[in-house]
Image: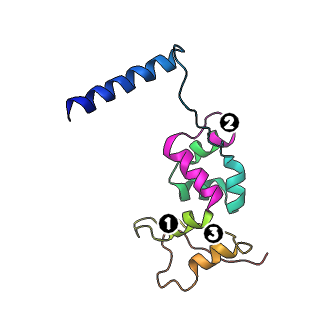
Amino acid sequence: MRDELFDELVESLREGGRIVRGEEEAARETELDEPSVGAIRDEFGLSQAKFAAMLGISVRTLQNWEQGRRRPRGPARVLLLVAARHPHVILDTIRHQDDRVSTTVKVDCAHDAEVQDAFAGSARAPTLARVEWSDD
């Protein structure tokens, strides 16, 4: 790493410390919506066990999030935001998971034409998720 880049990195860290200690104002702040884990799970129509399996987390972690004892952070938080805004992305991704995962997830998305379109004409059957369309 060149000296000037290293010096810039060190100065950024020092600036971050000053901001955390309240000695300096941040240049900008970014707020992300707090995902409502229970509402997202309800949108998928899944039990806690199936939703946790779909996300690759433990049921206990999901329960802690839903009951407010803990909050999803980092990549888990981003994944939940993606699940809330673009459920078809999650479904398409789990559909292409490795065959080593044997959990079956039933997703009721009959009302969502975009999700149905994501699976239409697929030559490859889902492996992690078996999506069953229902008119209920």
Q: State which quadrant residue 43 falls in.
A: bottom right
* Comparing labels 2 and 3, the label whose residue is closer to the camera: 2
Task: Identify the residue under disc 2.
Answer: 68
Residue 103, relative to residue 80: is it above or below?
below
In magenta segment, residue 75: yes
Residue 98, relative to residue 34: is it above or below?
below
Please state the horizontal and vertical placement of residue 20, each as a whole percent of the image. Answer: 51, 19
Q: Is the residue marked by circle 2 packed among few (<14), some (14-19), or many (20+) residues within 10 Å?
A: few
Q: Amino acid at mark 1?
A: Thr
Q: For numbered disc 2, what is the local secondary structure? A: loop
Q: Is the residue marked by circle 1 packed among few (<14), some (14-19), or many (20+) residues within 10 Å?
A: few
Describe residue 106's horizontal placement relative to residue 23 as left or right: right
Residue 93's disc number: 1
Task: Identify the residue under disc 3.
Answer: 106
Please state the horizontal and vertical placement of residue 61, each as a whole percent of the image. Answer: 57, 42
Task: Give the residue drawn at x 52%, y 49%.
Answer: 57
In the image, farthest residue toward the right: 136
* Comparing labels 1 and 2, the label whose residue is closer to the camera: 1
User: Which quarter of the rendering shows the C terminus?
Assistant: bottom right
Find the magenta span and give its range: 65-86
